[in-house]
Image (cartoon, helix red, strand yellow):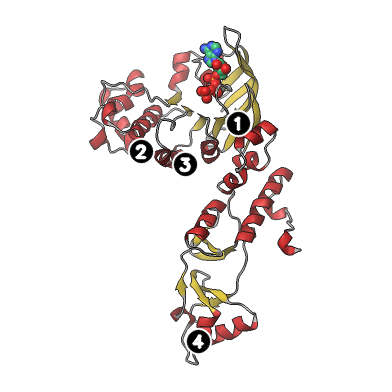
Amino acid sequence: MIRFEQVGKVYPDGTAAVHDLSFEVAEGELVTLVGPSGCGKTTTMMMVNRLIEPTSGRILVAGEDIAAVDPVRLRRRIGYVIQQVGLFPHRTVLDNTATVPFLTGWKKPRARARAAELLDLVGLDPSVYGSRYPDQLSGGQRQRVGVARALAADPPVLLMDEPFGAVDPVVRERLQDEFLGLQATVRKTVLLVTHDIEEAVRMGDRIAVYGEGRIEQFDTPAAVLGAPATPRVAQFVGADRGLKRLSVTEIEADDLEQPPFARLDEPARNAAARLRADGARWAVVLTDENDLHGWVSTEELSSAGRGGAPVGDLAHRMEAWVPVGAPLKHAFSEMLQYDAGWVAVLDGARFVGVLTPAKLHEALRRSVDADAQGVPRGQVSFDSVADA
Ligand SMILES: Nc1ncnc2c1ncn2[C@@H]1O[C@H](COP(=O)(O)OP(=O)(O)OP(=O)(O)O)[C@@H](O)[C@H]1O
């Protein structure tokens, strides 16, 4: 959808801002451009809507060399969100949002109806906020209006330059999540500039990590964190990249342990005898359909006496659980929150297995090796000190 072919930019004063950029952003993909200040991210982005012209190479949008496209026409196909949102102070939120539809000649009622739809989409009730002026909004709300305005003309491409930079970290995280939710439905082709590696990792399907004026690595967040291509990338992503990688590595069924289990309606004494014979101190409690009910200790089952009480009478609820496919970080955080030595992993209600700290470490290590070798994680073997 967006293709850079050996693009370079030298400013008139001789500053070479970027060199030899070649990369492609697929349709519906969100690529983050990240790197230290002055490395050329904004220059890269502004060449896409021709606010800056390259001095070498060419850029294609939807297969068309943009040098040959009228800049005004080009910009109508490309939404642009910037940090200083740039709303018109004397226009209402609704009319600010409708700016591009107005410019493209839509009738006012239609443009406003579209703007109201978009405000709703970004979580601002148009009947409450539509008639306000920008200075009557919080920073986060203004930022949302900026996103709504960029989306109002339904452009296939969206350029976002530090779009969540002007708000505090808590609001920023919420806006990031909201935008990702929105992106899952609107599926725009997005280039997002940030100097924040956390944001780049969180938002990007792929990340372009810049050094001075060039891309040092262009890959998935997991690959950038797991195998930085150059010392400069390693330095930029930081010493705690293992921790960051936890948030982009998904739990897979192969990562899990299968603990002993007891059936919800089997007699407690049968389950107790079986678990004692296996030397197990506890078991997960499952229904006949393998849905997770909870957990129970062997001791509790043993003390149930000789009656035929079912396991279900003694079971505890399972607080610590995560869905399969969730990031490892989510599982780790559940373990800490519930002070649990493991978390259950579910597919819908169905029990898939448990993740322990050792398995979590193993999954992380195998995912790094799998990326390096370009194979699925299940194909990577792992020897840990614990196995020795
Ligand atoms: N109009 C200009 N004339 C000369 N040099 C410029 C001009 N605009 C930008 N530069 C230089 O080009 C380089 C890249 O700038 P750019 O704004 O693309 O970086 P950036 O990575 O977006 O930085 P930041 O994160 O600080 O916004 C910098 O060295 C900058 O000083």
Mark 4 secondary-structure assignment: loop
* Residue at disc 2, secondary structure: helix
Q: Is mark 2 within 8 Å of ligand 1?
A: no
Residue at (53% x, 86% y) in the render: 302
Which is more foreground, mark 4 or mark 1?
Answer: 4
Residue 192 at x, y percent in the picture: 51, 30
Hey, what amino acid is under mark 2?
Leu
Amino acid type, callout 1: Ala
Q: Nearer the viewer, residue 34 or 80?
A: 34
Q: Which residue is under mark 2? A: 121
Q: Is residue 19 above or below residue 27?
A: above
The circle on residue 90 is none
**Residue shown at 56%/64% (left/top)?**
342
Quarter of the rendered image showing ligand 1? top right
Which residue is farthest top?
12
In the displayed structure, does residue 216 sit left or right of residue 66?
right
First reached walking from the N terminus: tag 2 or tag 3 = 2
Mark 2 → mark 3, Cα distance in angstroms: 12 Å
Choose the circle earlier in sequence order: 4 or 1: 1
Q: CA distance from mark 2 to mark 4?
A: 56 Å
Instruction: Report which residue position mark 3 lands on.
Output: 184
Q: Earlier in the sequence, mark 3 or mark 1?
A: 3
Location of mark 4 (residue): 303
Q: Nearer the viewer, residue 54 or 369?
A: 369
Whether residue 20 sits left or right of residue 185 in the image: it is right
Pointers 2 and 3 in contact (C-beta within 8 Å): no
Report if the beta carbon of the residue with label 3 is closer than 8 angstroms to ligand 1. no
Q: Are marks 3 and 1 in contact (CB under 8 Å)?
A: no
Sooner in the amino-acid sequence: mark 2 or mark 1: 2
- Of labels 2 and 1, the one closer to you: 1
